[in-house]
Image: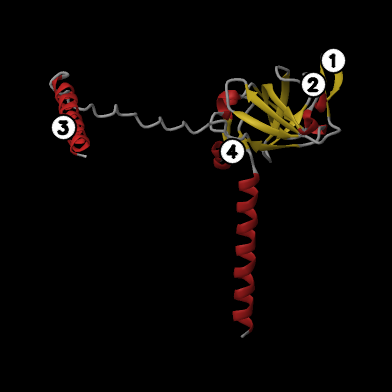
Amino acid sequence: MMIRSMTLAAAIALAAGASLSAQTRTDRAFTATGESCKEVNWSREVLQRAPNIAEACQEVMQRDGKYYVKFQGEVERVARRGQELTVAFKGGDTITLNPPENLTVIMDDRPRPVSALRPGDQLNFYVPEDRFTARFAAEDASPAAQPDVAIAPAPSQRVAAAEPPPETLPAAELPETAGSLPTIGLAGLLLTALGATLTVIRRRSRSM
């Protein structure tokens, strides 16, 4: 009985360890073997959200034993007082960043609130190897001390093409009649009937 309990406990421990290991692998944004964009292997989950992220890599650096990939992007849209930034990767995809409202970034050697960003502004940010988040940092600053900014897939800008309206078929044309002869004939018939009616009325008037 004791042996069975120990076996069951060992199996549970192994399953828990495997689950934790799988979770850790899933959370990683990428693995790197050197400081080159070609030496970065992005996780499947990241590639599903940003298929062209490898082409957008600008630089790889290592700080405090952790790899970071540098990106450059252009702000396309600022919403919710800076808490929702739509950014186009340079050479890559369009993503949405969700920074906290009070976050500042260094632009032109001066701190600038994220809420003050405008479309067209250029941003530098870094993605750490252990999670798919962004960290804003100046050119000569380390991203290790910067807070993580959540990355969400940008909302699709595709608009379903409206189906073209059904073609309006021309009304069926009536076959043309033989000129104006039927009209003339009908008018003559009516006049004949009117004349006969007047003749009857006159005869009755005389007989009375």
Q: Position of residue 91 (x, y in %)?
A: 58, 20
**Which amino acid type is marked by label 2?**
Ala
Q: Position of residue 30 (x, y in %)?
A: 61, 37
Q: Nearer the viewer, residue 133 or 13?
A: 133
Residue that label 1 marks: 109
Q: Secondary structure at mark 4?
A: helix
Q: Secondary structure at mark 1?
A: loop
Question: Is there CB contact under 8 Å for labels 1 and 3?
Answer: no
Residue 116, placed above or below residue 18: above
Residue that label 4 marks: 46
**Which amino acid type is marked by label 4?**
Val
Residues at marks 4 and 3, CA–CA distance in whole angstroms? 98 Å
- Quarter of the rendering containing residue 123: top right
Residue 138, which numbered label? 2
- The quarter of the image holding the N terminus is bottom right
Which residue is painted at 24% across and 29% down in the image? 172
Q: Nearer the viewer, residue 25 or 64?
A: 25
Judge the density around disc 4: few (<14), some (14-19), many (≥20) Cα neighbours within 10 Å: some
